[in-house]
Image (cartoon, rainbow, N blue to C red):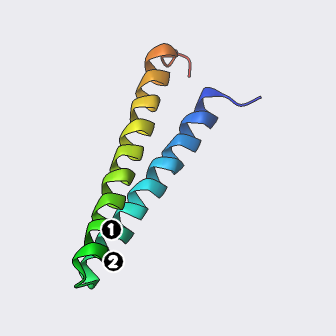
Amino acid sequence: MLSKEDYLEYLKEMIDVERKMMRVYCDLEGKTNDSQIKAIFSKLMKDETSHANAVDALVGLIKQKYPQKDNE
């Protein structure tokens, strides 16, 4: 059975991936001169930001619903 800490670690990894992809798309956006391609990478960056924010909100909800006990 997975513990709260297991879930939180998994979600942290998800946030790390989302942020990594934000950096990748930002880098790619800067390497092209094509305005349509730039717009695509910009949209992808916004999507990844939204994903990271959603996962971060989920982490907050988990921590709120299952607060850390004094003996943990």
Q: Earlier in the sequence, mark 1 or mark 2?
A: 2
- Residue 13: give x, y in percent of width and height: 53, 50
Give the SS element for disc 2: helix
- Residue type for callout 2: Leu
Asked whether disc 1 touches disc 2, contact meaning CB atoms under 8 Å apart, the reply is yes
Give the SS element for disc 1: helix
Classify 69 as above or below 52.
above
Query: In which quadrant will I find the C terminus?
Result: top right
Classify 35 as above or below 42.
below
Q: Nearer the viewer, residue 50 or 71?
A: 50
Mark 2 lies on residue:
28
Quadrant in the rendering for residue 53 = top left
- Residue 7: give x, y in percent of width and height: 60, 34
Q: Nearer the viewer, residue 19 or 25?
A: 25
Q: Is residue 48 left or right of residue 14?
A: left
Check the image and name the residue furthest to the right.
1
Q: Is residue 15 left or right of residue 35?
A: right
Assess disc 2: are there few (<14), some (14-19) or many (≥20) residues with their C-alpha within 10 Å of its C-alpha.
some
Name the residue: 54% across, 35% down. Answer: 8
Name the residue: 33% across, 67% down. Answer: 40
- Residue type for callout 1: Phe
Mark 1 lies on residue:
41
Classify 66 as above or below 40.
above
- Please count the marks in the image: 2
Q: Is residue 1 left or right of residue 18?
A: right
Q: Is residue 2 left or right of residue 38?
A: right
- Residue 36: give x, y in percent of width and height: 27, 74
Name the residue: 49% across, 14% down. Answer: 65
- Residue 15: give x, y in percent of width and height: 45, 48
Q: CA distance from mark 1 to mark 2?
A: 7 Å
Quadrant in the rendering for residue 34 = bottom left
Query: In which quadrant will I find the N terminus?
Result: top right
